[in-house]
Every structure is written in structure tokens, then in C-alpha cells.
Amino acid sequence: MALDDYVWAAGVATDLVNTAPEVWHGEDHLPDLGSLVAFADLHSIPTPAHASDLRAVHRLRATVRDLIDHPGRAGLITGASALTSPAGNVTLLPDSARWAVSLRPAATVTDALSLTCGVGVLGAVQTLGVERFRGCSAPTCQGAFIDTTRPGRRRYCMPGLCGNRVNVANHRARRSTLKHHNG
Ligand SMILES: [Zn+2]
């Protein structure tokens, strides 16, 4: 895993926390091993998933969410560093000579996701700062995210979903105001 690709890693951390039941009105979006395998595939994380990984990833998800919800610099660094414990050697990628870190032998999907989240949080703290760790601005959404956009003005945990919901709500509110004025 490339150490300089914290944008990708922070995106995986954001996607992971937003699978949690509290973001989906009680419905877990990683309810079983199959959904975990699909999540890992979607994010190009090719390590094996075992039955025990499901609960371990749920714990990891809660840990990462807690980090995003408490964005103090020292706490983020300590917490994210602990997530990198499955790391093996630091090396250079053979094709591009970028900094990279390997997983320990026999690493599981939990280890890979943990390392990814750790690198994502550390990279975002180092490069962007702690104000990039935020809750979703949509009034009814409990999601959270790490904002890795260049301007740093991201507002929603799932921009396509929460941003659209807010637009639709605003549109309805405007229309009902218009109706009221016309009627
Ligand atoms: Zn949201």
C-alpha cells in the first residue's frame, strides 16, 4: 500500500464509517461476510475475509468513527497509529519508487482495512489538518467523513445522496412557499 495515497485511504475510512447502522436508520450496510467481501473488492483490498472478520471490522468501524468524531490532533495521531499495527515493512513500490508499506504475512481483511484507515487518518492530519474531520451537514444524517478535497468545503458524508436529499428538501420548501403566496 502506497503511503502517499492518503486520499484513497481516507476515502476508504469514510466509506467504512458510513456503512454503520446509525447512518442508515438502524440498517447495517455490512451485515454479513458477503457484504464485507464486496466492500473490500470495491476498494481493491484483496486480502482474505474469515467469519471472525465481520465483528472485527464492525469494531474497527466504531473506532474510526470515534476518531473522526473527536478530531484532536494528539488523539487522532495516537488512535490512527494504533490502527497501523498490522503493517510489516516500509519499502518503495518497485514500479514507481513511491513510499509503501506491506502487510504482515497472513494478514486478514480486517488488518488491511485497519492499516488503510490508519494511513488515511495520519495522512489527512499531516497534510490537511484536523478541521477536515467532520460530521455530515444534512440535518437528518448521522454520517461523518474526512474531507480530502482541495478547497476543503465538502459538506456531506455521501455527496450524491445527502447533498441531493438536502436539495430536494430545499426545492420542496421553496415550492410550498410559492404555492402559499399564489394561493
Ligand atoms: Zn450524510
Image (cartoon, grey):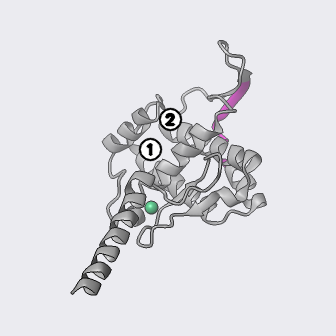
Residue 31 vertical position relative to residue 142 in the rendered view, above or below:
above
Left or right, residue 153 beside residue 76: left
Disc 2 residue crowd, few under 14, some 14–19, many 20+, Cα 10 Å: many
Q: Position of residue 140 (x, y in %)?
A: 41, 72
Q: Nearer the viewer, residue 34 or 183?
A: 183
Q: Amino acid at mark 2?
A: Thr
Across and down, in percent, residue 4 comes to 69, 32
Question: Residue visible at 65% across and 45% down?
Answer: 150
User: Which image quarter: residue 98?
Assistant: top right
Q: Residue 141 placed where, x, y %?
A: 43, 67
In the image, which residues are magenta?
A: 82-90
- Ligand 1's quadrant: bottom left
* Residue 142: numbered disc: none
Total labels: the figure holds: 2
Q: Quadrant of residue 154?
A: bottom right
In this rendering, is residue 78 above or below 4? below
Q: Which mark identifies residue 108? A: 2
Membership of 83 in magenta stretch: yes
Q: Quadrant of the N terminus?
A: top right
The answer to whether residue 7 is above or below residue 90 is below
Disc 1 secondary structure class: helix
Q: Which residue is mark 1?
A: 53
User: Decide: marks 1, 2 in contact (CB < 8 A)?
Assistant: yes
Foreground of the two, 174 or 159: 174
Crowding at dot 1, Cα within 10 Å, few <14 / some 14-19 / many 20+, comes out as: some
Q: Quadrant of residue 48?
A: top left
Tag 2 secondary structure: loop
From the viewer's perspective, is 39 left or right of 82? Answer: left
Q: Quick check: 5 left or right of 19?
A: right
